[in-house]
Amino acid sequence: MDMSEEVLQQASPGLIPGSGTARAAKPTRLSPSFISWLQAGPMMLVFLAFFLIPLAFVVIVSFWDYNEYQLLPHFSGRGYTDTFEGCLAQLPELCTIGKTYLKTLKLCFLVWAITLFIGFWVAYFLAFHVKSKTWQMGLSLLCTIPFWTSNVIRMIAWIPLLGRNGLVNSGLMKMGLINHPVEWLLFSEFSVVLALVHLFTFFMVVPIFNSMVRIDKSLIEAAYDAGASGFQTLVNVIIPLSKPGIVIGSIFVITIVMGDFITIGVMGGQQIAAAGKIIETRVNALQFPAAAANAVILLVITFLIITMMSRIVDIKKEL
Amino acid sequence: MTEGRPRSFYVLAIFFAAYVLFLYGPMIAIYVLSFQGPQGGLTFPMNGVSTFWIAKLFQGTGIVDLGAAFRRSLLLGVIVMIVTVVLSVAAGMAFRRKFRAQSILFYSAIASLIVPSIITSLGISLEFRIIDDLIKAHWNENFETSMGLLTSGLGAHLTWTLPFGLLIMFAIFNRFDPRLEEAARDLGATPWQTFRHVVLPIILPSVIGIGLFGFTLSWDELARSSQAIGAVNTLPLDLQGLTTTVTNPDIYALGTVISAVSFTVITLALGTIHVLNKRQAAKGSDAGKGLV
């Protein structure tokens, strides 16, 4: 590895001020840029073959025609017109697709708000109240463990609790609070939101915690010394400095929920329509251009949300 | 901060405990329910305690051929793990100096992480469908499909594991002291020797972490496999299929078995990382000496 001075500086600025000894003892035969290509090339190829080209195909195919059996590779707007069928005629009433996206955004907002609230306070507790590093590690690990197991398993885990004869219903009945089992606990929007929060709060905790542990404790001391109350310190010092973590966590949660079709399928009893479900349904009906058109719409919406959020912080700088 | 524990500590400690209970409660419920008696149903109370449902899984009398799905998931997981480790370490090394296309690779990885999985999955399935059509049209009319576990499926999983691998590598090299490499070079080590005897032993615990991440992400992967895997199913796909039809606790037994594999792999990996770290600490600056 021929590392020039400049590279060392870049890898670890300030570590080797003005060091002139970094030159390799003997010149290597391969040029540094060739080695870089060799090292980064394979990963680039994987992203090219399985991410960038597929993404391009989604956009291209969304403009193709189709019949019941196959893709017809010539230009057509059918994927989009089928999606928005009858929407103009129905105005000002929202059409099915409009309602579905609105529902998706609503679920997304609810999950975002709840995971942000829980994630912020869990991270706050770990970062500021748990003083010993060992305890901090142990408790973070405790939050991480459920993440090690399959999402579907964590979803079906709610069934014995929320079902008609589940623990919650039988508990409430035994306490005499209700006469009949409550139906909306399972296979409802409630259970979808609950499962999504259960699954993805972790994605909020980690980045916020990372931002918080980087906050210089002397800044908080300074705020106290200057007479700030706990609340003022929180609003004026801690929240602004945790912003990068909040934004990164939010991007994770929002993109996951916007594209989700599995949790919404399983926990909604396959009854709740959402953006991701439309794509899945279209694929199952072999209407690939229509599926692709919906994927493009979903992609554009997700991209807009992320662009808005990343205006708040420079994500690359924070990683 | 003031001395002693403020009231907010106790409030947040209770909040944290409630969150942990929320995380674990349901999972523990299904682990317990998978030991339901033969007559037991999907909910509490338990109707006896047995390993009936777990045994039933392994007899292959269930609805799906679990053994085959298990082997497929395992094979895919191991290959994804190896590829993720090799490509992430290589790309991580590349990112330590400037090279053209650096930001293209970085943004591809980030985009791959945040573009909704169903879109990536759909794209891969479209790509392979078009490849299939081309092969049928130009070479072989009877060609079935190029989609499969180790083609489209492997690719789909890698788009999920590689971004994590790369980000972990960034974290490692952020706190890596390049003076160690400098010293090795001054002593006349070749670039490969420097990597093999200096860099690799130091980063090894984190590299094992990447492998472990790769395996479990693949083992539990569902959304990206859903459209892109072809005709066969992985274990999570079978499990998802069961959620709509099953009325017996064997679904919980399956969940418990899948979780058990995840936990075993992670525990083994964490144990190895711990041993390696201890060894590094014990050997002080002679990092890697014990591994040569």
Image: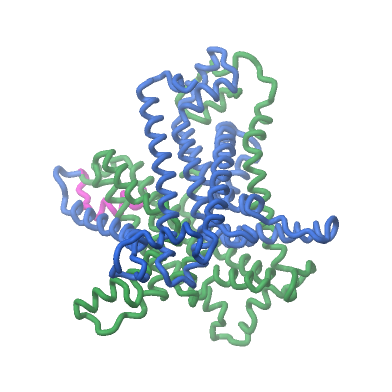
Image side of residue A72 versus residue A218, left or right: right
Q: Main secondary structure of the magenta part?
A: helix
Q: Nearer the viewer, residue B184 or A90?
A: B184
Identify the residue at image location x=39%, y=25%.
B280
Image side of residue A38 versus residue A216, left or right: right
Tell me the quarter of the image containing the N terminus of chain B: top left
Q: Nearer the viewer, residue A169 or A298?
A: A169
Q: Give the x, y percent position of residue B250.
A: 43, 64
Q: Give the x, y percent position of residue A258.
A: 51, 65
Tell me the magenta residue range. Answer: A225-241
- The colour assigned to chain A within the rendered structure: green
Q: Residue furthest right?
A: B138
Q: Give the x, y percent position of residue B56.
A: 44, 61
Q: Is residue B75 above or below residue A197?
A: above
Q: Residue furthest left?
A: B4
Q: Is residue B29 above or below residue A233?
A: below
Image side of residue A2 versus residue A309, left or right: right
Q: Give the x, y percent position of residue A187.
A: 42, 75
Identify the residue at image location x=56%, y=23%.
A5
- The colour assigned to chain B within the rendered structure: blue
Identify the residue at image location x=31%, y=40%.
A216
Q: Is residue A238 magenta?
A: yes
